[in-house]
Image (cartoon, rainbow, N blue to C red):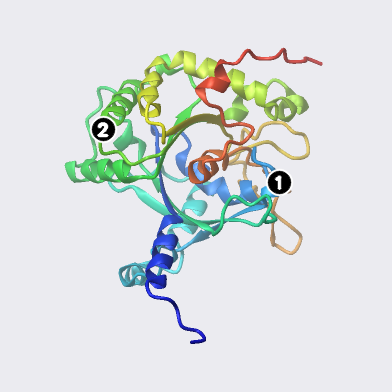
């Protein structure tokens, strides 16, 4: 009969839709740049400022909880209680004005639709991937050593439950002197416990080092040229891992054949397009953080600010595809080629 569906087809379609939903939890110390990275994601993908081939033609759009939940009634009621400004819009506004970091009490959730518009021969996705990105406050995930725990027991239980149920985990760590960081020991303990947890669900683990642009402040207009070299990024990652031997506990996660561990760098502030030098003053009076407005007052993408690689940790966690700036332990162990200095 025309238009009739075969028995069980709706159930199969529901399972297929559910398989396209991915929960990614961001974990890192206070001030590591987790919220800033989330705010930069759509701009980074729209500008193609990532390490994935342009032939994939990726798009990333913020969506509501209702779409992620597949129109579930509880999700619709939740959104009715929200203000007309979505949580993600509030995040963008807060980041743009140098707002406060994520509260340690309740992990924040943001939702996106990741679509691949490539030709069928190059496509790796058969349907849009719906992403839930969970931003965990640094004081909850990696509190400073010796400081009182501000988060309640209920918040810590919620964090642990969310972390173990996530499809992918992104550890966001700043490129700083780790021996001087008061959060390193608490982060090390968290990673060790996660590696030993038998009921963890994550199949992809990404360690993303933030503030990549700060390493090139003395290179002037050559800064972006060197930052775009994957061998430079690999060198930075080798040095960062040498400072953090406690990250070796992540190798326990890789012992399972279905778990992938990757390392990458990113810069949410990026580089200025005109002079190619790092953006070191995103709070400059009169400027927007990720875009500028034209004469008619409309936002203009890719004109001034240029987020760089900010989307790579999320794309790797969501797709399981390695970009030019995503490295495994094996790739980092390869002998580096000599870098040409002009």
Q: Residue at x 46, y 83 (%)?
A: 4
- Please name the residue that numbered disc 1 is placed on: 54
Q: Nearer the viewer, residue 246 or 267?
A: 246
Q: Nearer the viewer, residue 56 or 189?
A: 56
Tell me the quarter of the picture where residue 148 sits: top left
Residue at far bottom of view: 1
Q: Position of residue 284 (x, y in %)?
A: 62, 41
Q: Nearer the viewer, residue 1 or 28?
A: 1
**Reading the chain from its start, which is encountered first: label 2 or label 1?**
1
Q: Considering the numbered disc 2 on the image, is that residue within a helix, a strand or a loop?
A: loop
Q: Position of residue 3 (x, y in %)?
A: 50, 84
Which quadrant of the rendered structure holds the C terminus?
top right
Q: Is residue 66 something that shows in the picture?
A: no
Q: How many marks?
A: 2
Q: Is residue 279 something that shows in the picture?
A: yes
Q: Nearer the viewer, residue 40 or 97?
A: 40
Q: Residue at x 25, y 27 (%)?
A: 147
Q: Residue at x 22, y 33 (%)?
A: 149
- Please name the residue that numbered disc 2 is placed on: 197
Tell me the quarter of the picture where residue 142 sits: top left
Label 1 Cα crowd, 10 Å radius (few <14 / some 14-19 / many 20+)? few
The reply to whether the C-beta atoms of the residues labelled 2 and 1 are less than 8 Å apart is no
* Vertical relation: 331 (above or below) 172: above
Is residue 248 found left or right of 300 in the rendered image? Answer: left
Is residue 51 found left or right of 225 in the rendered image? Answer: left
């Amino acid at each position: 009969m025309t238009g009739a569906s075969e028995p069980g087809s709706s159930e199969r379609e529901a399972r297929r839709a559910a398989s396209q939903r991915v929960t990614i939890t961001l974990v890192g110390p206070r001030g590591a740049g987790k919220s800033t990275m989330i705010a930069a994601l759509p701009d980074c993908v729209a500008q193609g400022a990532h390490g994935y081939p342009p032939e994939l033609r990726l798009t990333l759009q913020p969506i509501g909880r209702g779409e992620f939940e597949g129109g579930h009634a509880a999700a619709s009621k939740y959104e009715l209680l929200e203000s007309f400004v979505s949580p993600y819009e509030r995040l963008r506004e807060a980041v743009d004005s140098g707002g406060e970091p994520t509260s340690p009490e309740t992990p924040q959730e943001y939702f996106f639709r990741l679509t691949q518009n490539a030709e069928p021969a190059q496509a790796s996705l058969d349907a849009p991937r719906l992403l839930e990105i969970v931003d965990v406050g640094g004081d909850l995930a990696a509190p400073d050593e010796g400081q009182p725990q501000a988060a309640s027991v209920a918040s810590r239980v919620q964090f642990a439950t969310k972390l173990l149920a996530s499809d992918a985990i992104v550890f966001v760590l700043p490129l700083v002197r780790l021996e001087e960081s008061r959060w390193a020991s608490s982060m090390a303990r968290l990673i060790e416990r996660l590696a030993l947890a038998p009921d963890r669900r994550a199949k992809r683990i990404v360690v993303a080092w933030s503030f990549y642009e700060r390493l090139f402040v003395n290179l002037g207009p050559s800064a972006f040229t060197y930052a775009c070299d994957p061998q430079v990024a690999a060198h930075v990652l080798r040095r960062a891992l040498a400072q953090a031997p406690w990250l070796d506990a992540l190798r326990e996660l890789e012992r399972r054949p279905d778990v992938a561990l990757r390392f990458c760098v990113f810069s949410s502030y990026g580089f200025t397009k005109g002079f190619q030098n790092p953006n070191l003053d995103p709070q400059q009076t009169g400027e927007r953080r990720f875009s500028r407005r034209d004469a008619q007052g409309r936002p203009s993408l890719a004109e001034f600010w240029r987020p760089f690689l900010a989307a790579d940790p999320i794309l790797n966690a969501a797709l399981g595809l390695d970009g030019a700036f995503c490295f495994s332990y094996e790739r980092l162990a390869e002998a580096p080629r000599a870098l040409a200095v002009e």
